[in-house]
């Protein structure tokens, strides 16, 4: 479910810069400095209904956007102007101004090539300050490759990164090598996710964080 439940549960922060959150995760204490991105507005509306909140009681900025649409977000130099979160017309206005990005259950929905493009786009949003981070999880493997589900899921065949391939993507492709620290590990889910791979085994997840040094 992608109705912003982790956003509302939130992670707490003291950053004065805007926080951009894909799918889930924001700083509750600074909700007026938060930007949530989703391709369909009805999921955000459902989140308000689920938590009995409103735009007034939970004033995070919501932007319906396709993260693979270069007109909405594309790699490039930092924006020279401080973004006005109330009047954003493009995510490119946030380039170089975001201190925390949460991107969970996202990357494995795309091909290897599109995952690279998405990483480059999101990476361009990250502020050029020590400690600025992007973190989340996706399905993962100890060795990068494909998984196939035996049960009906929206994306039955997925390309999964490994800790080493994920590190290589962010430290050397998205960012100059040595400018970030990447931590990634493969582990099982904390609960039964209700699906199995064609091997009969449950899927595993890659938990990760990329942090500017």
Image (cartoon, rainbow, N blue to C red):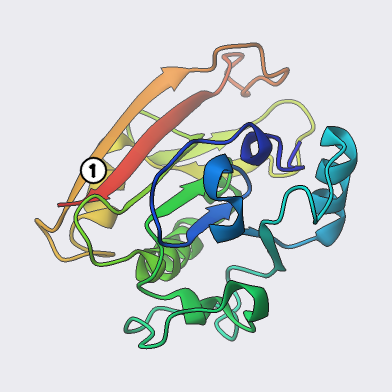
Coordinates of residue 211 in the picture (x, y in percent):
25, 48
Coordinates of residue 192 in the picture (x, y in percent):
66, 12
Relative to 194, is 7 above or below?
Answer: below
Q: Quadrant of residue 7?
A: top right
The answer to whether residue 64 of the structure is visible from this angle is yes
Mark 1, residue position = 182
Question: On the rendered structure, is 43 left or right of 67?
Answer: right
The residue at 79%/32% (across/down) is: 152
Question: On the rendered structure, is 78 left or right of 40?
Answer: left
Coordinates of residue 86 in the picture (x, y in percent):
65, 74
Q: Quadrant of residue 87?
A: bottom right
Q: Nearer the viewer, residue 11 or 212?
A: 11
Asked which secondary structure carries label 1, the reply is strand
Q: Nearer the viewer, residue 123 or 194?
A: 123
The answer to whether residue 27 of the structure is visible from this angle is no
The residue at 71%/35% (across/down) is: 5
The residue at 58%/16% (across/down) is: 202
Dot 1 crowding, Cα within 10 Å, few <14, some 14–19, many 20+? many
Coordinates of residue 103 in the picture (x, y in percent):
51, 48
Q: Nearer the viewer, residue 190 or 48?
A: 48
In the rendered view of the protein, which quadrant contains the N terminus? top right
Question: On the rendered structure, is 22 left or right of 176?
Answer: right
Q: How many marks?
A: 1
The residue at 47%/58% (across/down) is: 115
| Residue that protrudes farthest toward the left in the picture | 178
């Amino acid at each position: 479910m992608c109705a912003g439940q982790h956003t509302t549960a939130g992670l707490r922060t003291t950053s004065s810069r805007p926080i951009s959150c894909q799918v889930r995760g924001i700083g509750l204490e600074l909700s007026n400095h938060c930007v949530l991105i989703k391709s369909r507005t009805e999921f955000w509306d459902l989140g308000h209904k689920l938590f009995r909140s409103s735009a007034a009681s939970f004033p995070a900025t919501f932007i319906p956007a396709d993260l693979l649409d270069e007109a909405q977000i594309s790699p490039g130099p930092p924006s020279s102007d401080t973004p006005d979160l109330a009047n954003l017309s493009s995510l490119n206005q946030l380039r170089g101004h975001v201190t925390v990005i949460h991107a969970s259950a996202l990357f494995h929905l795309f091909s290897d090539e599109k995952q690279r493009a998405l990483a480059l786009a999101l990476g361009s949003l990250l502020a050029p300050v020590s400690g600025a981070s992007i973190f989340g999880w996706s399905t993962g493997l100890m060795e990068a490759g494909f998984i196939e589900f035996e049960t009906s899921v929206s994306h039955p065949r997925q390309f999964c990164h490994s800790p080493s391939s994920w590190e290589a993507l962010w430290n050397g492709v998205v960012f100059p090598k040595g400018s970030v620290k990447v931590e990634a590990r493969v582990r099982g889910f904390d609960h039964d996710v209700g699906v199995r791979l064609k091997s009969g085994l449950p899927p595993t997840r890659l938990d990760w964080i990329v942090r500017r040094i």
